[in-house]
Amino acid sequence: MSITTRAAVVESGGAPFTLSDVVLDDPAPHEAVVRLVAAGLCHTDLGVASGGLPFPLPGVLGHEGAGVVESVGSAVTGVAPGDHVVLSFTSCGDCRNCHGGHPAYCATWLPLNLIGGRRADGTSTISRDGEPLGGHFFGQSSFAERALVDERSLVKVDPGVPLASIAPLGCGVQTGVGAVWNVLKPATGSTIVVLGAGAVGLSAVMAAALTPATTIIAVDRVAERLQLAKELGATHTVDASGTPLGEAVAEITGGQGADGIVETTGNTAVLRQGVDALAARGTLVVVGAPPFGSEVALDVNGLLGGKRVVGLTLGDSETQSFIPALVELVKEGRLPLDRLIGTYPFADIGQAVRDMTAGRTIKPVLLF
């Protein structure tokens, strides 16, 4: 039986989010209806809403949902009504990367999550006035009071942890943490540099503080964010508007350079500076996404010292094991996400967008 719910709809590229009644399709066998309690707002949502990606609009975005399962399709086995869940990306479950524990590199990741707006079979999950809307965003479209969620987007979590405190785990936080834990894997005494102190970058700082890395350098232009980075585990901070990055890192490391760098800004000039600041055999993880088609020139001879540049999607995380572990760290106070979060009533999504764009709030979380 279809369900009418309230959602934030983007009518066209560049248009604001507006609240509207929409209708969810009947759940397919591998889908569940989730009552949203909270949903994080991410720069990816804003990029799609601006028209920067070919997602079908009008549509419903949102991909950091957290809520309570209300009903499940006939083939769903991992969750049951009443379970608390964090919603993350979906994947096919059948390709080589899914079978290998790397669902973020699913062969059908782009259409299933970012640009398709439909189920894999082409059917729509959301409609309004009888007309289909773009939906199934990251398998969830969670900017709504209720969402029709793909089974592979559902992660069952500890009901003792407030859902508003863990909604960002579905995308931004697991991306920053995964960059450090799943890719850089810092060795004892290593140096980690995080370029950009937004939600993803500060998540990377917190993750690095839980590793054997002894030097953690946060780089940004905003003094308040650099101060927060120090409070979250950075041992050093660099004001990007002052000393050039390479000089600053060389001074801190005694000329050695960085063993690992997480680039979150999406600025190709910053990426180039990061590669130049690597130590021999160092690795830079590309997290920030510039516009499609962006290119960066690198000094080829500078790479011959064993430097690596690695692209990353969603922390290269296997969500069913990774997200519950992060929830436990939040519960224990070892991953203090509350320092990043500002909460807004769902109806104030426009204000949340403005505050995020202006840098007043690091990670807005909408409450339903």
Image (cartoon, grey):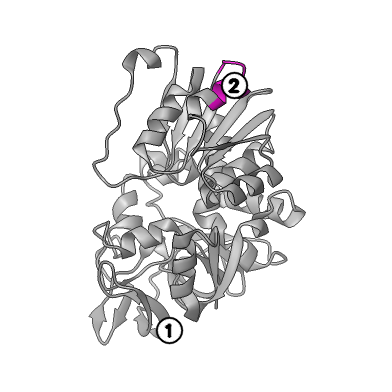
Residue 128 picture location, percent across and down: 29, 83
Image mark for residue 258: none
Quarter occupied by the C terminus? bottom right
10 Å crowding of disc 1: few (<14), some (14-19), many (20+): some
Say whether residue 318 is visible: no
Against 292, residue 39 (above or below) is below
What residue is shown with label 2? Answer: 251
The amino acid marked with disc number 2 is Glu
The amino acid marked with disc number 1 is Thr
Given residues 66 and 123, the one toward you in this image is 66
What residue is shown with label 1? Answer: 5
Given residues 236 and 204, the one toward you in this image is 236
Residue 240 picture location, percent across and down: 50, 38
The residue positioned 64% from the left and 63% from the top of the image is: 165
Q: Is residue 251 magenta?
A: yes
Given residues 163 and 347, the one toward you in this image is 347
Residue 244 picture location, percent across and down: 48, 29
